[in-house]
Image (cartoon, helix red, strand yellow):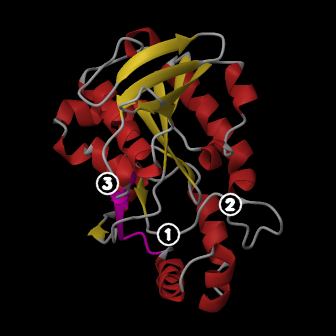
Amino acid sequence: MLILIAESKTMGACTGHVSTEEYALHRPELEDTAEALMHALRDVSAETLAREVKISPALASRLKMMIYDFPHKSSGEQAITAYTGVVFKAFDYKSLTPIQKKEACDRIAVISSLYGWLNPSDIIKPYRFDFTTTIALGNRSLASYMKDRVTGCLIKRLSRMKCTEVLNLLPADAAKCIDFKKIEAVAKVWRADFREINLIGEYRTPPSNRLKTLRGLLLRQIITERINCISELSQAESEEYMASSCDQEAGKIVFDSVATKK
């Protein structure tokens, strides 16, 4: 079972030293595409970046520095530790054992608005976009621009792994990077949905941060307990959630959790 997760908007500084040999070994598959996109933005002002990427002037100034620094590969960070968002904090990769870390790198793929397709061990530079960003692409979003490339990478990965199940833990905007109709021709795609139940028995979709936390915790459980297929996942439970239904036809597995107090 291959698991798909999305980037987070928050990232570390990615300033660790990277040797030429290390970078060659962990170069992202679509690095050339990312390089071309960043190069196209070198002459774009911070003011335009702020407006088009929909970020603050201060963050746009930092993004401008990231763009200039992007070609310099003597510093960077592995993708699985570069992202610092809620999903990644809940997953807590650094606390895994060496065997579990290898398991994670073998079974997880990260979908990125800039890099498109990332293996967890790929070395990346910091950036700040999202999947709806259209700057330098006319009216196309980054998700649309990356779709064919990312889909191709996923198909190759599934073939190499001889894998026939995909667990989709992507939010809707990241999922637009993949043509799932093409993927369904080679593997069964499953979506994990979470719902909360409150004290009076009402169900709802968890708030955004809670949903991200649950995705990260589920990812951690899959790796630490070596859950290898959907049939095993359909029996999963923890202190935070438990599997409640598994719809083969819809390709959906639902996890219930107790609503947290505000």
* Residue 45 location (% of width, % of height): 64, 91
Q: Residues within 10 Å of mark 1 (few under 14, many from 20)?
A: many
| Magenta residue check for 74 | yes
Upstream in sequence: badge 3 or badge 1: 3
Mark 3 / mark 2, whichever is N-terminal:
3
- Tell me where residue 32 appears, x and y as whole percent: 61, 60
Specify the quadrant of the image occupied by residue 77. Answer: bottom left
Which mark lies nearer to you, 1 or 2?
2
Q: Amino acid at mark 1?
A: Tyr
Identify residue for label 2. 132
Residue 50: % across, % down: 61, 83
Residues under numbered marks 3 and 2 in contact, where contact means CB atoms less than 8 Å apart: no
Q: CA distance from mark 3 to mark 2?
A: 24 Å
Residue range highlighted in magenta: 72-83
Residue that carries the numbered disc 3 in the rendered image? 81
Q: Is residue 67 above or below residue 92?
A: below
Q: Residue at horizontal 83%, vertical 65%?
A: 139
Relative to the observer, which residue lies in front, 119 or 232?
232
In the drawing, does residue 185 fall left or right of residue 66? right
> Mark 1 sits on what residue?
127
* Residue furthest front as drawn: 200
Look at the numbered disc 1 and give the secondary structure of its residue.
Answer: loop
